[in-house]
Amino acid sequence: MKKWASLSIASMLLLSACGGTTQTSAPAGAKKDGGAAEQKQPAQAAGGEKKKLSFWYIETGPRKDLIEATVQKFMKDNPDVEVEAVQIPNDAYKTKLSVAMGGGNPPDVFHSWGGGWLKEFVNANQVADLTGKVNTDSYIPAAIGASTFNNKVYGAPLAMSVVPMFYNKEIFAKLGLQPPKTYDEFLTIVDKLKKENIIPIAMANKTKWPAAFFLMYFAEKVGGPQIFSEAFERKGRGFDDASYVKAGEMIQDLVKRGAFNPGFNGLTYDTGQSRQLLYTGKAAMEMQTASYVNNVRNEAPDFEKKLGMFPFPEVSGGKGNISNVVGGVSPVFSVAAKSKYPDKAIELVKALTSKELAQQFSDKTSAISAVKGVEYKDPFAIQLNDMLSKAGYLTTFYDQTLPPDLAELHKDTTQALFGESMTPTEAAKQMEAKAKELLKK
């Protein structure tokens, strides 16, 4: 896992939250009159009762539609199997799955992001070993690496993500602004927008992870791409390094400048409270994962023509490069060790990470594929994949890489930095003290 904390991208590309139960619906365009597009499955397969699988996932909008269509096709191809697909909001998902795992009643197939969060379940013998049961050569090496521990595979990936700054091109054009290449240019834009009574950066940070992107980028741009891996692997600088203190200072400088919408630490991202600020022209920018495009197409398709993106700018005197990005792998699909029908569950994972679905994810939701052989045609997907392709390093999401207790402290301290209830030095010291307790050299 540790080698996945901060990666060189060149080699990787050479080979290529508590929600209610929701039954899967028919794919978009399915007929409602009992026609061929909506054939009900027989109550029983030839051999008796159907094998029932439960599947939990977090995708919304067009991604949800594609997932549901894939599940429907899987059941048609496997008439002896019935899949209950449950969509759970992202912010409630982790808690719900942890409770299910701890209670001994997990879903057969479940979403993860790989990394330290999945590894905790693996260490507790709660995840099935998929080694030799999925074709690892079908996936980009770094993507499958996110769910590979001790040379054993515990999940298969469908997509990857990077975190750009999204912006309203119409506002930028009206004010004569250009995407910045340096952080000084970025601050000039922030100040200009503020003077025009436009919120520079929209944010909804009640669940703590959205604002954490700023800490990750600031630390990397100031301290260089190895800053996180050194602290994580306990080989060099720690989480109390001057780069992390400086990152906290830069966060609080943005807050003092009025760069964000009022009350951001109390708003919920899942419900679209920050995105609405962009859609209505009240805010000009928002830093988010590549799934932002999927949200726009689902919530405000007319806004898509105004949507642009740029990489987080480099900091003068810093060791990071503008090409280096924060990102990760999502979704990764795994099988619970307690699944009553592991073979069928594995077949479902294969269907959910097929080249066919990966191509549809790219075409319709602008996703960067974790599956080899996908041809990029969607303009946003091309730009996002280009951003990843040109990256010298990918720093993975801290909260998906760190052990859960340290990941939670990372989010807590970052939220406190944005709320100005903790100093940068205090936040860094707390992180380092916890890292010494939980991480081994």
Image (tube, rainbow, N blue to C red):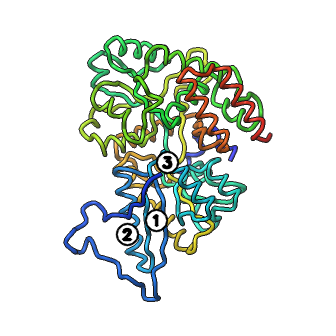
Of marks 2 and 3, the one in the foreground: 3
Query: Eyeballing the image, is 125 above or below 216?
Result: below
Asked whether 98 or 438 is in front, the reply is: 98
Q: Quadrant of the C terminus?
A: top right
| Amino acid under disc 3 | Ala
The answer to the question of whether label 3 and label 1 lie on touching residues, with beta carbons closer than 8 A, is no
Element at label 3: helix
Mark 2–mark 3 Cα distance, whole angstroms, equals 28 Å
Element at label 2: helix
Compare marks 2 and 3 and give the one earlier in the sequence: 2
| Residue of label 2 | 73
| Residue of label 1 | 351
Q: Crowding at label 2, few (<14), some or many (≥20) Cα neighbours within 10 Å?
A: some
Quarter of the view holding residue 195 = top left
Q: Crowding at label 3, few (<14), some or many (≥20) Cα neighbours within 10 Å?
A: some
| Residue of label 3 | 92
The answer to the question of whether label 2 and label 1 lie on touching residues, with beta carbons closer than 8 A, is yes
Q: Position of residue 178 (x, y in %)?
A: 36, 19
The answer to the question of whether label 2 and label 3 lie on touching residues, with beta carbons closer than 8 A, is no
Asked whether 164 or 415 is in front, the reply is: 415
| Amino acid under disc 1 | Ala
